[in-house]
Amino acid sequence: MVVFFILAFVKGKGNRLRNFLKSGGCLLALLVFVLIVGAMSEDVPVTEEVNASITDKEAEAKAKQEEEDKEREANEQEEKEQAEKEQEEREAKEQAQKEQEEREAKEQAQKEQEEREAREKAQKEQEAKEEEERKAKEEAERKAKEEEERKAKEDSVTVSQKQAVAMAEQYLSFMAFSKSGLIDQLEFEGFSTEDATYGVEHISVDWQEQAVIKAEEYLDFMAFSRQGLIDQLVFEGFSQEHAAYAASQVGL
């Protein structure tokens, strides 16, 4: 401004106006320039502040987003772990229940098996008892029947038949006989064939042993070959089997 007034008044009047206009133009230009530069200088801090504010907000938003993401991930992880824990607890509970059911089923099956075995055992014992009672009853009935038959026979036995029995026992007490030979001997003594047969059939005797005794009697007073002795015993009324047995027993 000082320069402007100096230039305006330094030269003569004719040039003052021109100088003044020039100086005024320069001054105006200078003022415009200063205003522009000032405006620009003022805009730069504002822009920087705006940019800084935006950056801070973005950083804050990013940090907040990251924090939210971390919190969400933590919640998801927690929910996942909780779900896994609940799943494990549910599976453990189901497994325990399954094992309990299997154990109860096994115990029930064992109990039923034991009850079935007990019933079968009791049934077998009952059947065995009934079978034993049945056999005992049959045996008692058989003996009773035999006793009745024996008494009936005794009641129906004639005096002659009784005598035939007694004489048959007497003969066997001192001499060996075959069955048919003893019947013949009793007939020779005067008994009928019926009474003689009755007498021989109602004595207790081992006819095979009688054959051995008869073979020994023959050998006491006469020599025999094996076949000769067998033939003699058969002639006496012994069976071929009893005769061969007797020959073997006496060493032939």
Image: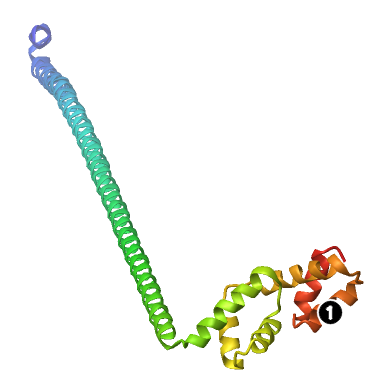
What residue is shown at x 19% (from left), y 32% (from top)? 71
In what quadrant of the picture does the C terminus appear? bottom right
The one of 214 and 76 positioned closer to us in this rendering: 214
Q: Label 1 amino acid?
A: Gln
In what quadrant of the picture does the N terminus appear? top left
- Against 75, is 123 above or below? below
The location of residue 220, given as percent across then percent down, is: 84, 65
The count of marks equals 1
Q: How is the image coloured?
A: rainbow
The one of 232 and 167 positioned closer to us in this rendering: 167
What residue is shown at x 7% (from left), y 13% (from top)? 13
Which quadrant of the figure has residue 130? bottom left
In the picture of the structure, the residue carrying the numbered disc 1 is 232
For the residue carrying disc 1, how many other residues have a C-alpha within 10 Å: few (<14), some (14-19), or many (20+)? some
The one of 81 and 164 positioned closer to us in this rendering: 164
Q: Is residue 202 visible?
A: no
Task: Residue lying at the far front in this picture: please name it.
Answer: 189
- Secondary structure beneath disc 1? helix
Q: Is residue 242 visible?
A: yes
The location of residue 38, given as percent across then percent down, is: 13, 19
